């Protein structure tokens, strides 16, 4: 499929949608990127060279048919572009906003070298937003009622993607979530400047309109056991995500003013959503007027530093024990944070937290590091430089060191559920089924902390397996796969 409108990468430079001016965008939590204009999107889509073997598609976890939708967008056939892109992606406008494209589709675009990649994510977002504006996003088509039901634990992207696919096939679907809103980390983790909350609630509304039931403020393990859900439904999907914050073991770690990243971000998101949040109002989980130090180098750390800036911190520093080239967070987000005034303190590791008489943190004692020989994973190991200790003043410290699964067999009241030594649910990779008959799992609780796009992929795959399982009998998925 080629057209003379394509292959424009030689004559047309890469353009991303304009960013809002820094001094304006740090005053609120709205998204920072503008939408493409129609002409801008067409022009950028036309840079694609329509590869016969599209590496962009191979490196998209959903294997989105990127060249086809780019060509349709370049030709101005936006409704068809939307139909192609939404055939493989449950939430294309969300992925277009928050996928780390530099590590996925765009990072593998063949014209990346020398010419800069096609701006795939921004076109995906534009196409889907245009579809919403023009009423091309039809209600979810619900298949003929089967009289069979699936219970899904977790209303994050993994659970929601599975819910939609199963409803399309005519299953009665109930999603249970311990939170009071639908969206998981899309709503309470990721800040509005990356993903506005209306974008998430628009999707949630569609799922409700399709007849999916949501039991919110419902914690499985407290309000019902996994065994009770298994008795209630023909199959159950565990999509509970990972929420146990990794901690540092060092002197002073228990001082007041030191917080886990997700407490800080959830509080900020709740405040933005208009909830009463005493921990924010009383100044505890509020960076206003404080010198803030964030520890970590991943996407969560980037979200914390940029949230602190918007709350009115007097200074924001990000400590990371490796260097810029070796940090796990998206380089795009690092650049955004730097523009917004965040100082990155590379190759630096905390050794202790110092406090005053009031038991509040007042400084972070840290050491400089150098990168030594590579370990078995190929990453250079950071080594402390003796005698390099110094103190960074801090009124608030946020720990963004990653997440592990909670103890799920205990949490769900199901000691027989098999988990790995890291606590993730063990599933048959061919079927997504756990060791418990009819109990499937998807998203971060299987992979460990990962990405939205992978949770969507897992949720869609799990829905296919659940469908086969219910239709062909309890032993079918394993038999099918073998
Ligand atoms: P979650 O989104 O975690 O949803 C799990 C749901 O299960 C939650 O709603 C939870 O309340 C519910 N639940 C848990 N236990 C129970 C129980 N016992 N009973 C009932 N309900 C329960 N990914 C990206 O691709 N791009 C990004 O920019 C990005 N930024 C991120 C920023 C932050 C701060 C964080 C923390 C993560 C970020 N991620 C990002 C990762 C991404 O959010 C996750 O990979 C994704 O949300 C995982 O989806 P999930 O459905 O598996 O789990
Ligand atoms: Fe790229 Fe993510 Fe869209 Fe796939 S879903 S094409 S990785 S932005
Ligand atoms: Fe187009 Fe780049 Fe994908 Fe090739 S790799 S099809 S040029 S977007």
Image: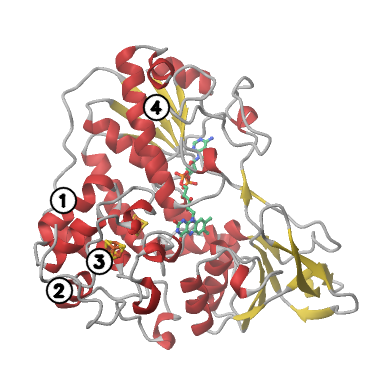
Q: Are marks 4 and 3 in contact (CB under 8 Å)?
A: no
**For the residues carrying marks 4 and 3, which lies nearer the camera in this image?**
3
What distance separates the C-alpha of mark 1 from that of mark 4?
A: 29 Å
Is residue 208 placed above or below 201 in the rendered structure? above
Residue that mark 4 sits on: 151
**For the residues carrying marks 2 and 4, which lies nearer the camera in this image?**
2
| Left/right of residue 466 with respect to residue 297 in the rendered view | left
Q: Secondary structure at mark 3?
A: helix
Q: Which mark is residue 38?
A: 2
Is the C-beta of the residue carrying label 1 under 8 Å from the nearest atom of ligand 2? no
What distance separates the C-alpha of mark 2 from that of mark 4?
A: 41 Å
Residue 228, percent across and down?
A: 49, 18
Q: Earlier in the sequence, mark 4 or mark 3?
A: 3
Residue 237, percent across and down?
A: 43, 29
Residue 32, percent across and down?
A: 37, 75
| Left/right of residue 51 with respect to residue 30 in the rendered view | left
Residue at 24% across / 56% down in the picture? 52
What distance separates the C-alpha of mark 3 from that of mark 1?
A: 14 Å
- Toward the right, the furthest residue is 387
* Residue 417 position by quadrant: top right
What distance separates the C-alpha of mark 2 from that of mark 1?
A: 17 Å
Residue that mark 1 sits on: 83
Residue that mark 3 sits on: 123
Q: Earlier in the sequence, mark 2 or mark 3?
A: 2
Is the C-beta of the residue carrying label 4 under 8 Å from the nearest atom of ligand 1? no
Residue at 78% across / 69% down in the picture? 350
Q: Residues within 10 Å of mark 1 (few under 14, many from 20)?
A: some
Q: Earlier in the sequence, mark 3 or mark 1?
A: 1
Query: Which quadrant would the N terminus be assigned to in this image?
Result: bottom left
**For the residues carrying marks 1 and 4, which lies nearer the camera in this image?**
1
Q: Earlier in the sequence, mark 2 or mark 4?
A: 2
């Amino acid at each position: 499929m080629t057209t003379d409108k394509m292959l424009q990468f030689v004559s047309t430079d890469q353009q991303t949608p304009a960013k809002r001016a820094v001094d304006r965008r740090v005053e609120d939590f709205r998204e920072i990127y503008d939408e493409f204009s129609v002409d801008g999107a067409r022009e950028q889509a036309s840079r694609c060279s329509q590869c016969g073997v599209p590496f962009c598609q191979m490196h998209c976890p959903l294997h989105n048919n990127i060249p086809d939708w780019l060509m349709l967008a370049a030709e101005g056939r936006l409704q068809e572009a939307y139909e192609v892109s939404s055939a493989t992606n449950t939430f294309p406008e969300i992925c277009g906003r928050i996928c780390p494209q530099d590590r996925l589709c765009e990072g593998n675009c063949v014209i990346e070298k020398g010419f800069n990649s096609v701006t795939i994510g921004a076109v995906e977002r534009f196409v889907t937003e245009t579809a919403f504006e023009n009423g091309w996003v039809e209600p979810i088509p619900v298949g003929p009622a089967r009289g069979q039901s699936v219970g899904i634990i977790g209303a994050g992207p993994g659970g929601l993607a599975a819910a939609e696919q199963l409803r399309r096939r005519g299953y009665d679907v109930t999603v249970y979530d311990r939170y009071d809103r639908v969206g998981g980390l899309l709503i309470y983790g990721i800040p509005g400047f990356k993903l506005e909350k209306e974008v998430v609630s628009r999707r949630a509304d569609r799922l409700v309109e399709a007849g999916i039931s949501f039991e919110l403020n419902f914690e499985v393990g407290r309000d019902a056991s996994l065994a009770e859900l298994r008795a209630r439904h023909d199959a159950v999907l565990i999509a509970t995500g990972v929420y146990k914050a990794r901690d540092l073991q060092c002197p002073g770690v228990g001082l007041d003013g030191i917080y886990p990243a997700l407490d800080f971000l959830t509080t900020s998101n709740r405040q933005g959503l208009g909830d009463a949040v005493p921990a924010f109002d009383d100044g505890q989980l509020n960076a206003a007027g404080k010198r803030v130090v964030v520890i970590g180098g991943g996407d969560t750390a980037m979200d914390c530093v940029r949230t602190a800036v918007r709350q009115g911190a007097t200074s924001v520093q990000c400590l990371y024990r490796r260097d810029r080239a070796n940090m796990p967070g998206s380089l795009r987000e690092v650049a955004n944070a730097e523009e917004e005034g965040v100082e990155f303190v590379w190759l630096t590791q905390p050794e202790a937290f110092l406090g005053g008489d009031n038991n509040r943190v007042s400084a972070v004692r840290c050491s400089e590091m150098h990168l030594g020989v590579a370990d078995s994973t190929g990453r250079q190991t950071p080594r402390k430089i003796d005698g390099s200790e110094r103190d960074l003043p801090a009124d608030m410290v946020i720990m963004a060191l990653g997440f592990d699964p909670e103890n799920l067999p205990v949490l769900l009241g199901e000691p027989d559920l098999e988990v790995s030594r890291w606590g993730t649910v063990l599933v048959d990779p061919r079927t997504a089924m756990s060791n418990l008959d009819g109990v499937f799992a998807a998203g971060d609780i299987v992979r460990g902390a990962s990405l939205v796009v992978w949770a969507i992929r897992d949720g869609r795959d799990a829905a296919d397996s659940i469908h086969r399982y219910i239709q062909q009998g309890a032993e079918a998925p394993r038999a099918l796969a073998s």
